[in-house]
Image: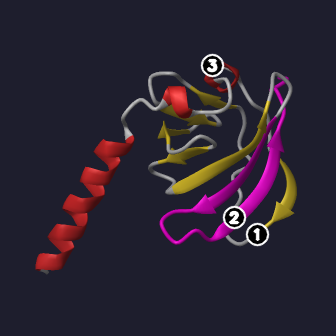
């Protein structure tokens, strides 16, 4: 039981450390990612687990993301190409980001299981 408390404390500590602003290390223009509604992901390579096909997906500079009409999560930059969705426990490795597409590989966290490789295009209602 004492290890469970230690694990929880460690998770909160890691989450707090990852909230730091490493925007300058991100190799893509974050402004291309945030405040833009992205449409239904086009699956390029399916993996294991469920694929969320809700739309639009909108990342906000304040650190939260809306996925479809009913889901809200929190996101943070993890590395020069990776973002982390906290509640979904997913890392999104960004393969390409431009005005016209968001190409990502999603993996579960912390085990790294491959979920899907997909492309998001701007949302068109």
The quadrant in which residue 114 appears is: bottom right
Q: Which residue is mark 3?
A: 35
Q: Which residue is mark 2?
A: 115
Q: Which residue is painted at 29% across and 58% down in the image?
A: 11
Residue 112, position as x, y percentages in the image: 58, 68
Work out whether 40 lies above or below 89. above
Q: Residues within 10 Å of mark 1 (few under 14, many from 20)?
A: some
Front residue of 101/53: it is: 101
Q: Which residue is mark 1?
A: 47
Residue 43, position as x, y percentages in the image: 85, 54
Of pointers 3 and 1, the one earlier in the residue sequence: 3
Total labels: the figure holds 3
Quarter of the image that includes the N terminus: bottom left
Of pointers 2 and 3, the one earlier in the residue sequence: 3
**What element does badge 3 sit on?**
loop
- Residue range (magenta): 102-125
**What element does badge 2 sit on?**
strand
The CA distance from mark 3 to mark 1 is 28 Å
The CA distance from mark 2 to mark 3 is 25 Å
The quadrant in which residue 69 appears is: top right
Q: Which residue is painted at 52% across and 26% down in the image?
A: 24
Quarter of the image that includes the C terminus: top right
**What element does badge 1 sit on?**
loop
Work out whether 125 lies above or below 53. above
Task: Examine the structure image and report whether residue 103 is included in the region drawn in magenta.
Answer: yes
20 lies left or right of 23: left
The CA distance from mark 1 to mark 2 is 4 Å
The quadrant in which residue 102 appears is: top right
């Amino acid at each position: 039981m004492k290890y469970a408390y230690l694990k929880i404390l460690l998770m909160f500590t890691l989450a707090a450390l990852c909230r730091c602003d490493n925007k300058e290390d991100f190799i893509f223009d974050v402004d291309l990612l945030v405040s833009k509604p992205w449409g239904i992901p086009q699956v390029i390579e399916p993996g294991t687990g469920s694929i969320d096909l809700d739309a639009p997906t909108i990342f906000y500079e304040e650190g939260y993301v809306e996925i479809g009409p009913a889901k809200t999560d929190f996101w943070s930059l993890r590395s020069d190409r990776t973002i982390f969705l906290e509640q979904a426990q997913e890392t999104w490795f960004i393969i390409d980001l431009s005005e016209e597409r968001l190409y990502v590989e999603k993996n579960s966290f912390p085990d790294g299981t491959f979920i899907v490789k997909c492309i998001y295009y701007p949302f068109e209602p």
